[in-house]
Image (tube, grey):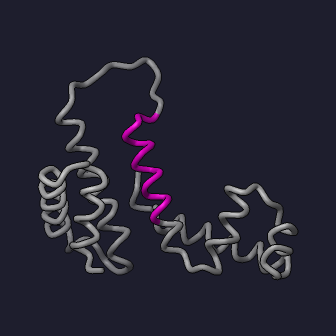
Amino acid sequence: MSEDTRVSALAFRLAGNQDDAEDLAQESLLRAWKYFSGFGEGAVWPWLRAIVFNTWSTWRSRRRPQCQTAVRAPSFDQQLLRAIAVREAVAELPGELRLPVLYHALGGLTGEEIACRLGLSRKTVYQRVRRARLELRKALAGFR
């Protein structure tokens, strides 16, 4: 799947309708083009994904009235963005890293329990969970 197709698909999921998704994708790609000289090296998709999320967040804040709240809890939009980013980052993990980190983080299993289920040594499980966390941290670095 090409990067512009991925941007369009993510924009549609965030915007909820085709017209807004096209506007969001176009504005995101324009921002990416504008700041591409500062990109450097590395994977392009996490960088583009962060641009789409940030563009959507800015776009949404301009379209709705500003509310004053006493508590600075994450907004629903921020929680949604974070959840989507984490889901996509986990989905992009190699299978050998994805299962151990999901069993550990979501299933609450211990290293020993995961090792039994996957037929691995406990040390291997801990190494894979650690590597998965590092990969997730890198993938979500551009996300606020």
Image x and y of residue 47, in percent: 33, 67
- Of 76 and 47, nearer the camera is 76
Image x and y of residue 54, in percent: 29, 51
Residue drawn at x 66%, y 64% as measured from the top left: 102
Q: Magenta span has 26?
A: no
Residue drawn at x 77%, y 75% as measured from the top left: 125
In the displayed orientation, state which residue is furthest to the front: 17
Magenta region, main secondary structure: helix
Q: How many marks?
A: 0
Query: Where 76 sits versus 127, above or below?
Result: above
From the viewer's perspective, tell me whether residue 19 is left or right of residue 37: left
Query: Where 118 sits versus 9, above or below?
Result: below
Q: Magenta span has 85?
A: yes
Location of the N terminus by quadrant is bottom left
From the viewer's perspective, tell me whether residue 111 is left or right of residue 107: right
Task: Magenta stretch: give its range.
Answer: 74-88
Query: Where 116 sits versus 141, above or below?
Result: below
Say which quarter of the image contains residue 37: bottom left
Image x and y of residue 44, in percent: 32, 76
- Of 129 and 138, nearer the camera is 129
Query: Where 77 sits versus 69, above or below?
Result: below
